[in-house]
Image (cartoon, rainbow, N blue to C red):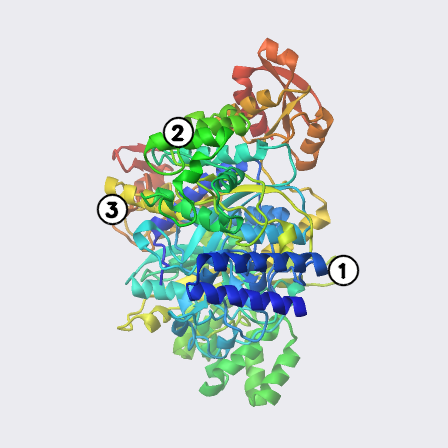
Amino acid sequence: QGTRDHAPAQAALRERLLGTVVSCFKRHGAAAIDTPVLELRDTLVGKYGEGAKLIYELQDQGGELLALRYDLTVPFARYLAMNKISKMKRYHVAKVYRRDNPATTRGRYREFYQCDFDIAGQFDPMIPDAECLKIVHEILSDLQLGDFVIKVNDRRILNGVFAVCGVPESQFIPACCTVDKLDKVSTGLRGRHFWSWDGCLRLGSVVAVLVEKSFTAAEMGLGAWLVRLLTVVPHKLCLCGLMEAVGEGNILQQLMSFCALQMPWEEVRSEMVAEKGLSPEAADRIGEYGRKVPCVGVSIGIERIFSILEQRLEASGEKLRTTETQVLVATPQKHLLAARMKLISELWDAGIKAEMLYKKDPKLLKQLQYCEDTGIPLAAIVGEQELADGVVKLRDVATRKEVRV
Amino acid sequence: MAEEAAVRAQAETVRRLKQDKADADEIAKEVAKLLEMKAQLGTDEGKHKFVLKTPKGTRDFGPKEMAIRERAFKAIISCFKRHGAEVIDTPVFELKETLTGKYGEDSKLIYDLKDQGGELLSLRYDLTISCHSWGDDSFSCPSLALSQVPFARYLAMNKITNIKRYHIAKVYRRDNPAMTRGRYREFYQCDFDIAGQFDPMIPDAECLKIVHEILSDLQLGDFVIKVNDRRILDGVFAVCGVPDSKFRTICSSVDKLDKVPWEEVRSEMVAEKGLSPEAADRIGEYVQLHGGLDLIEQLLQDPQLSQNKVAKEGLGDMKLLFEYLTLFGITGKISFDLSLARGLDYYTGVIFEAVLLQQDNEHLEEPLSVGSVAGGGRYDGLVGMFDAKGRKVPCVGVSIGIERIFSILEQRLEASEEKIRTTETQVLVASAQKKLLEERLKLISELWDAGIKAEMLYKKNPKLLNQLQYCEETGIPLVAIVGEQELKEGVVKLRIVATREEVNVRRESLVEEIRIRTSQC
């Protein structure tokens, strides 16, 4: 339930999509890693807060207690800790497993791909963070999904807002969760019992200006403070060409930390249009290592993008090829199987992507039909005459033109 | 410990309060108390005793291993694509009932997911023929004929009658792995299959051609692909007087001939499996044979075999296969080997296995086989087992022993001391003086936008030496250096790391220059 078999057309589309994402990660010099799909239950427990009930556990079959990985971030943190790595730029494209009830049209299945890019290490502030945003921008542009915006915020700013609004510290995380829902729910925090509008008016300096702007935006609580944010966050963001990506009047959102009861991290995360980014937990949470490794990273919501591309493809009626075959080796007359096999073998040995029908004496029409059905652009035809002349008739399937080669 | 118990009790209290929808302030108070207690615990005894590891029998793949893996997959996938195969992907879960009952005794090796109130699920056991032993452990074949469960199910469910597909994915087994021999609980399988009713032996020949191409491309060294046919073996057993009931068990004995001498196999058949010594001897006359077309011709003339219907069928097809393989130009590495038995339960026709050969420089006449790296065959009855109407779809396919190949490539790499790059970065954007971070950011952004693979150090004012050092460590071939002088002149200094020569390149031409230089490598 909630998993699906990927027919060839879907698989081809997915391959294209993942290819684009990975080539972007590589362009930025990330190395790949892979971790097992299974983790010790203890590794995952306690890291996800509310998400914990969504973890797939394996039955106790008398060995270690195991569970399927819920994301790629905790495994990454574990990898860093186990290998005592303090600096790393890595990407990881793999499937993760969650038990939520999928609303299939919104593209959330129980088994789905995540594409994560993370930079771990102590560096000069905001440079790696800016690169992460640049990567998101590149991927979304390359995929040509249409117009997009990347919303940015900082946990420290929100905590500050909550503090001055009189939200008790123990409520910070739940407050974040609620704020996080703002883009999906039109009513804001108004009416929530743990903070009031009056509180907002007591804000000082930067934060006050921001909130003030929000009042006039008439949308909800936290308003368009992006421009102000840029004076707080170094202007590196502009230099990486992101200014145009950031719209105005957008609601800033908190990025969720899935670790419910813990010290907040010093990071800035960006939220993608499709999927939320996570703050990875540092090595010291895992236990043995004891050292903090600052991390910043992004998780691409590949399934959501895949759904969008799939719908687009269906709507456009464009037929996506499921193979990459360049030429079909065909014979018009009977008893020419040997000639076909010899020729196709030469083509394969030279690295050409070629196919032939598995029939001793196929009709030429059927062979050409096969090309049209599967999108093969060329047909290399050897008939008795061609064999005698030492040539091959190369036919362009689309135009039907033939040349002797 | 007392404190831990107290923390747990406090957590219970909080949970209960929340459940009872108690007063918000009270909950907050208890939560704060819990937090404090946890913090206390943290400082008191140090970190909670937690074991940091991957589950038994699984491992992480670091950048170096991934680079090797990518190299292997690239060769394999490009071969599959060259032959026009499509890719399908099936979920890692199977309904538990689909898997159990198909693997017989092996069912206890399947990972089960906890019953969390939904369907009972298990992790996929294999994509393909499961009873091959890639390792040196002998792994007895499951008593039920089964393999390629997800693929066969997919064909049956979608009523597909012909498809040429490849599938690379991880599968999960709970057996005790001997890690040094490369058998983990989570491992990759890599399959290629052609399903459909076609003229005989053409798809089978293509499978063999594919194995040949992959093993050649990977440059693993010398190899041989042994081929045989179930019908030939059945025929041999029949004419040698093996009772029907003993076919399978004699088969598994014969299968050991690649590792164990004939004498031992013979005594196992007679002593343990109750075969008559005469029958065993007659079997010995056949199963120790191997060769090419000439052997096939010889057997076709064999007075007894030529009387046996299935043997004749098998030999006829084998001859046809060899003719096709000759056209494909690969018979040099093919050996018709009558000792090849491989899990005959589900194979219905041709079977094959590829083994790497170790050239021993000493006095051995025949090269030692290092172990199989690919195997497969024709299995015409499998889809029919899943189809509601029992409709058959003939299939032939091959499974590539990718884990074994990884091991070999890893060992090779270590032995050769070749340094494998873990990234594909073409150029490092560096600065020679201080306060040039912005210029670096601008330049690298231009390069990324043009599709160039570029990196820079995450330091405001890095030393040039450190930046060059980074290139040498990670294998980045070029450095684009921005300096105050160069900026004024509108050029960028491009440095070739290997030779240390430097050229001044105009900013507009930089992208093109990098492309040219890196394509030459």
Distance (Cα) linking label 3 and label 2: 64 Å
Judge by depth and name the residue closer to the eye, A146 or A255.
Answer: A255
Mark 2 or 1: in front is: 2
Dot 3: within a 10 Å radius of its alpha carbon, few (fewer than 14), some, or many (20 or more) residues? Answer: some
Residue picked out by circle 1: B362
Q: Position of residue A377 (x, y in %)?
A: 32, 38
Q: Secondary structure at mark 1?
A: loop
Dot 2: within a 10 Å radius of its alpha carbon, few (fewer than 14), some, or many (20 or more) residues? Answer: some
Q: Position of residue B91 (x, y in %)?
A: 41, 60
Q: Position of residue B310 (x, y in %)?
A: 40, 76
Q: Secondary structure at mark 3?
A: helix
Q: How many marks?
A: 3
**Badges 2 and 1: C-beta atoms under 8 Å apart?**
no
Question: Can residue B225 be seen in this snapshot?
Answer: yes
A82 with respect to B215 (left or right): right
Judge by depth and name the residue closer to the eye, B18 or A307.
Answer: B18
Q: Secondary structure at mark 2?
A: helix
Q: Is residue B122 above or below residue B268?
A: above
Distance (Cα) linking label 2 and label 1: 85 Å
Residue picked out by circle 3: A369
Mark 3 or 1: in front is: 3
Q: Which numbered circle lies on residue A213?
A: 2
**Quadrant where the image shows the N terminus of chain A:** bottom left
